[in-house]
Image: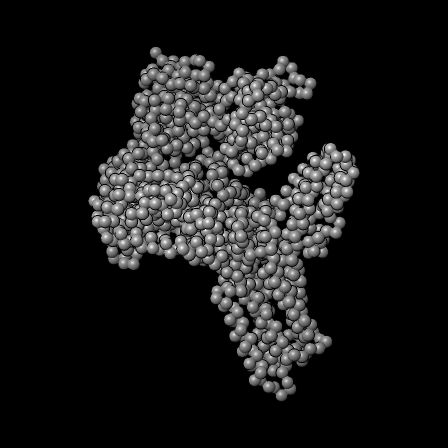
């Protein structure tokens, strides 16, 4: 038993399935020549539309399956593997269903929403491929919690080191320990940066203030700078950790709500076709 | 004329029950207790602890009542009833010596008093007495030997004496509100757990705690009146630079306890072996080898409160010359019912006698030990052809054949190849000793009568009865040799090899032998596991991992007496060490043996070459072995390059286990991208099983180590687990989560969540130890793995996983 990614799950089972779906659809589309051009109203259009709608429902059911922990209906990994491949296949199936017709109507809205959902999903796949390994590397065996503990420990050491130095330096150290923020707004989380980083400010300011100190304090001052340097590095790593996690999470805030919007638009699309056309 | 007829030492459940029964009968007696209260062990339980009355099937026979309840409730009942019976209790009387003989024992106490008695009942338990300072002032009220609640003290100067875990934990906890000084006899804290050692060193480095190294206490003195700064006394320490005085409010000395064994031996009582878990040999009437000196309670091997109380009652009856039927008689009657019915209603004592006669292995047990053994065991009469256990099952019970025969399928490819074992033989010792799966399938033969004994009782018997240990060890050796090296060699020939065999134990990390050493002994791994490493480019590279059942040192067989690799114990390991000459002789006489060993050598050489080319695999093996996987049978591994940190594994675990996740995904070490989360590894010899009073931890057929519902929440398993995977949780079966309502309206508890409020309200909720049970009761396998969306979580058997071909792909 070895680890295997969701792409290769069960010998590329769902990749193969999707290739069959896509190739069949493309061939059918190519050989099918309805009188009024390819559109959703032909027998092939209905078939592809039905298939697409069924796939969308199945993809949305993933959210249920993922949380049905007692269910033994396949592994969640298999579901996700199918979710990813079928989602990509949907681009082709839905486009062929539409017969490349675009307009200012509810049908195209559903089509566009579907695209946004799929592309947010593709970003998710990208994030899942890229960030886990980076996160492990960045953490160096620690957890975020331990990094925060280490930070407060460094704060304490800084205060002790600064105790021998001037009041201004002490103030600057106090500011550093009280006002350094990890995380914060969505943007701050995603960027992994804080333009008003209190630690960095303290590092720069203490550097300046140290220059004014008498020689006999040089030893303490340089020890303080080492500690502040360590903290800067740690703060940066903690922010990067938050950033990676945010990158792995952020797309879901688009993917999930928009998929519900898609479901609504899709319902409107189907209802309008059967009742008003 | 002695002062008393019966002197009872120790007022635990056994002693207390004995004294009260003596009082009830109007016998002249005294109960000697070293502290100022009854039953110190239970007295020291944490406040409000729920005390269980296991085993529930056993009837209580004592003048004192006892049913499950809180510590306070039980102690209150005992205090009232002991007084109600006019029991003669002498508190604050620590016994230091027992001399004399039946009819005239003289008991010396610490205060210098001598008490004489005709009979002595010893019920001092296993906890031992806390070690005191042993200097002037050790009993002053400012000196204490325990710390219940560190938050009770504030703004004091407190001197903590000791360098063990207890001392460090106390010192660190006290720093929150106090000025703490620690006194260490040496210059380091290496005896403590890693976390504590790091903690105390850090506290010292940052001047939070002041240490005194190489310091011994000279005396403690209390001032006439407190100093202006509040200190009420001083401690005088001798250090390398002379004597120092430290003023303080309080001294907390954590110097461990004096195990009672030495004291017991000083009374002339003999133990059958040096094994720390061995109990003194006693007669059916609880009398030790010293005539007139009886032992009851935990010291006699009865750690449960109820059985100790029963013993207390019975021992007084025995001293009075009454042959009472033991309290367990109805239990045994029930055990033997179906067997007795078929054999002219044989009485309990006759069945026991028959067992002793028919099974030589058990003939060395005293009746008392055999009764205890049989209460834990089952008497089975399987029909001919019934499967007792199957090859590769993970059960670890032990079987003795009382009558009839069993059939052993020796060749898994051909079930018709069988050998039979007859009356008096035993089987199941391989799994018991190695912690591995069953090595063969066993079927019941004609008229088969078996005793099936659980692992714990068997281990207890092995450590208490020397003859049982010897016979089982020999059988294990013979069968291991037959299975692994010489299946076709006659028993007589193997005997000559076995006679040279010795049993060797190695600590984790210890070397069996080093690359380049000379030597020709062969080691067969009996329990534990080994790593094989070689020096490549000046660096030690691990080449392979060998679980129990394998052997090393085989090269010597072919005249190569220079060791080609370094062999190290991955975990605590026992090997059977076979003499090279005897082994060579065996191979010379038996071509088949030579061929088998040659095959192993060839395979190993090939694997080693592969491994040397790919030294990363070796590093992964080293890492996994360092994490204790050398003793694991099934472990959760996370590939962090796939793990998206969604914690669906934890949620799945919680959802399928009443809201408490038994795994901590984030905690635990990582090497390269391989992460070992804090989760049970289902050890071969589970540490958690070591000391479980109600015997609630078991191994299921597929290897799952699980905690049954009779857990009493004592926390022993949590403390014994070196991997920190057991937690204490309030388990309420009334946990409701609703996916649909949560998803649509946000109401209710999300799947994978924990409804703490419902658990608190549930009167049936129980605080107990919880751990991974590999979802043995759920279809579809472990839910953590099933719920992982990216395939990052897998469960593997390390023995199979840590192979060249597997790790090459990492």
Residue B490: horizontal and vertical position, in percent?
A: 21, 48
Number of callouts:
0
Q: Is residue A94 above or below residue A218?
A: below
Q: Which residue is drawn at 32% across and 50% down?
A: B439
Q: In this view, does A41 lie above or below B30?
A: below
Task: Work out whether residue B758 or residue B402 is closer to the camera in this orientation and state it.
Answer: B402
**Visible in this render: residue A189?**
no
Residue B491: horizontal and vertical position, in percent?
A: 22, 46
Q: Decide if residue B622 is on the left or right side of residue B142.
A: left
Q: In this view, does B41 lie above or below A273?
A: above
Q: Residue at x 45, y 21 (%)?
A: B33
Q: Which colour scheme is used?
A: one colour
Task: Work out whether residue B661 or residue B77 is closer to the camera in this orientation and state it.
Answer: B661
Q: Decide if residue A109 is on the left or right side of residue A70.
A: right
Residue B804: horizontal and vertical position, in percent?
A: 43, 55
Q: Residue at x 43, y 27 (%)?
A: B259
In which quadrant of the rendered view does residue B374 lie? top left
Quadrant location of the N terminus of chain B in the rendered image:
top left
In which quadrant of the rendered view does residue A103 lie? bottom right
**Visible in this render: residue B611?**
yes
Q: Which residue is drawn at 36% across and 51% down?
A: B393
Q: Decide if residue B752 is on the left or right side of residue B330.
A: right
| Residue, far top | B1
């Amino acid at each position: 038993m070895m680890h295997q990614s969701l792409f290769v799950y069960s010998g590329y089972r769902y990749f193969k399935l999707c290739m069959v779906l896509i190739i069949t659809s493309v061939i059918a589309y190519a050989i099918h020549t309805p009188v009024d051009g390819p559109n959703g109203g032909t027998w092939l259009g209905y078939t592809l539309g039905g298939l697409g709608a069924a796939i969308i429902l199945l993809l949305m059911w993933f959210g249920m399956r993922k949380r049905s922990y007692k269910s033994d209906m396949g592994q969640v990994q298999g579901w996700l593997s199918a979710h990813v491949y079928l989602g990509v296949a949907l681009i082709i199936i839905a486009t062929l269903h539409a017969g490349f017709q675009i307009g200012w109507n509810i049908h195209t809205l559903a089509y566009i929403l579907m695209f946004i959902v799929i592309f947010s999903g593709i970003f998710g796949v990208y994030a899942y491929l890229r960030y886990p390994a980076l996160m492990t590397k960045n953490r160096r065996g620690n957890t975020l919690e331990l990094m925060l503990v280490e930070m407060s420990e460094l704060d304490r050491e800084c205060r002790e080191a600064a105790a021998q130095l001037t009041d201004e330096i002490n103030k600057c150290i106090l500011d550093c320990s009280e006002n350094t923020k990890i995380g914060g707004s969505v943007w701050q989380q995603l960027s992994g940066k804080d333009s008003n980083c209190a630690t960095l400010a303290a590092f720069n300011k203490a550097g300046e203030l140290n220059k004014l100190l008498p020689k006999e304090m040089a030893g303490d001052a340089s020890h303080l700078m080492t500690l502040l340097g360590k903290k800067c590095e740690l703060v940066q790593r903690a922010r990067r950790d938050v950033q990676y996690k945010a990158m792995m999470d952020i797309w879901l805030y688009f993917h999930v709500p928009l998929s519900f919007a898609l479901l609504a638009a899709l319902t409107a699309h189907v209802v309008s076709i059967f009742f008003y056309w | 004329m002695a002062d008393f007829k019966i002197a009872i030492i120790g007022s635990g459940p056994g002693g207390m029950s004995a004294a009260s029964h003596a009082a009830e009968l109007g016998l002249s007696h005294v109960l000697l207790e070293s502290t100022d209260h009854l039953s110190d062990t239970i007295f020291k339980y944490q406040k409000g602890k729920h005390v269980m009355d296991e085993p529930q099937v056993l009837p209580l026979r004592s003048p004192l009542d006892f049913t499950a309840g809180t510590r306070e409730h039980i102690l209150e009942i005992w205090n009232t009833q002991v007084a109600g019976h006019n029991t003669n209790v002498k508190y604050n009387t620590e016994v230091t010596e027992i001399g004399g003989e039946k009819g005239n024992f003289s008991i010396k106490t610490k205060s210098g008093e001598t008490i004489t008695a005709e009979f002595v009942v010893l019920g001092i338990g296993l906890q031992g007495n806390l070690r005191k300072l042993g200097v002037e002032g050790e009993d002053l009220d400012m000196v204490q030997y325990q710390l219940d609640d560190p938050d009770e003290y504030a703004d004091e100067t407190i001197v903590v004496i000791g360098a063990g875990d207890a001392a460090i934990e106390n010192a660190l906890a006290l720093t929150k509100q106090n000025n703490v000084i620690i006194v260490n006899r040496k210059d380091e804290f290496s005896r403590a757990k890693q976390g504590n050692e790091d903690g105390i060193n850090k506290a010292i480095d940052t001047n939070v705690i002041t240490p005194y190294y190489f310091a011994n206490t000279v005396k403690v003195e209390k001032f006439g009146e407190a100093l202006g700064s509040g200190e009420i006394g001083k401690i005088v320490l001798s250090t390398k630079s002379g004597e120092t005085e430290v003023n303080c409010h309080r001294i907390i000395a954590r110097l461990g306890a004096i195990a009672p064994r030495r004291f017991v031996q000083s009374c002339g009582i003999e133990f059958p072996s040096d094994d720390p878990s061995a109990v003194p040999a006693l007669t059916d009437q609880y009398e030790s080898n010293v005539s007139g000196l009886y032992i009851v309670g935990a010291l006699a091997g009865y750690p449960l409160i109820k059985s100790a109380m029963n013993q207390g009652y019975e021992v007084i009856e025995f001293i009075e010359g009454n042959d009472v039927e033991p309290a367990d008689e109805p239990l045994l009657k029930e055990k033997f019912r179906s067997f007795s019915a078929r054999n002219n209603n044989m009485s309990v004592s006759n069945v026991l006698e028959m067992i002793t006669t028919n099974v030589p292995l058990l003939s060395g047990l005293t009746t008392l030990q055999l009764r205890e053994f049989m209460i834990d065991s089952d008497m089975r009469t399987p029909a001919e052809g019934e499967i007792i256990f199957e090859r590769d099952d993970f059960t670890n019970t032990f079987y003795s054949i009382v009558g009839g025969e069993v059939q052993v399928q020796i060749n898994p490819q051909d079930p018709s190849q069988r050998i039979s074992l007859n009356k008096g033989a035993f089987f199941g010792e391989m799994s018991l000793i190695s912690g591995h799966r069953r090595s063969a399938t066993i079927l019941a033969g004609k008229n088969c009568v078996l005793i099936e004994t659980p692992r714990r009782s068997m281990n207890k018997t092995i450590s208490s009865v020397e003859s049982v240990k010897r016979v089982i060890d020999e059988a294990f050796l013979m069968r291991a040799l037959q299975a692994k090296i010489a299946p076709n060699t006659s028993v007589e020939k193997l005997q000559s090899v076995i006679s040279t065999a010795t049993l060797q134990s190695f600590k984790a990390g210890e070397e069996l032998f080093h690359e380049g050493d000379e030597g020709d002994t062969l080691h067969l791994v009996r329990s534990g596991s080994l790593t094989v490493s070689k020096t490549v480019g000046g660096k030690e590279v691990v080449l392979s991992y060998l679980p129990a059942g394998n052997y090393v040192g085989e090269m010597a067989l072919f005249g190569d007496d220079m060791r080609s690799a370094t062999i190290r114990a991955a975990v605590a390991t026992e090997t059977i060490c076979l003499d090279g000459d005897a082994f060579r002789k065996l191979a010379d006489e038996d071509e088949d043996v030579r061929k088998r060993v040659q095959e192993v050598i060839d395979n190993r050489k090939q694997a080693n070459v592969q491994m040397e080319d790919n030294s990363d695999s070796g590093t992964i093996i080293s890492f996994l072995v360092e994490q204790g996987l050398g003793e694991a049978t099934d472990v959760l591994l996370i590939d962090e390059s796939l793990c998206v940190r969604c914690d669906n594994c934890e949620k799945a675990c919680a959802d399928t286990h009443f809201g408490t996740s038994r795994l901590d995904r984030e905690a635990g070490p990582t090497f390269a991208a391989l992460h070992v989360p804090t989760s049970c590894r289902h050890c071969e010899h589970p540490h958690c099983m070591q000391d479980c009073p109600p015997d609630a931890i078991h191994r299921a057929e597929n290897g799952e180590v699980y905690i049954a519902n009779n857990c009493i929440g004592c926390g022993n398993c949590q403390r014994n687990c070196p991997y920190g995977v057991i937690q204490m949780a309030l388990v309420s079966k009334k946990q409701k989560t609703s996916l649909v309502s949560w998803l649509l309206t946000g109401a209710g508890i999300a799947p994978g969540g924990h409804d703490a409020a419902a658990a608190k309200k549930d009167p049936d909720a129980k605080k107990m130890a919880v751990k991974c049970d590999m979802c043995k009761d759920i279809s579809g396998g472990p839910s953590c793995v099933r719920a992982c969306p990216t395939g990052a979580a897998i469960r593997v058997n390390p023995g199979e996983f840590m192979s060249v071909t597997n790790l090459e792909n990492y």
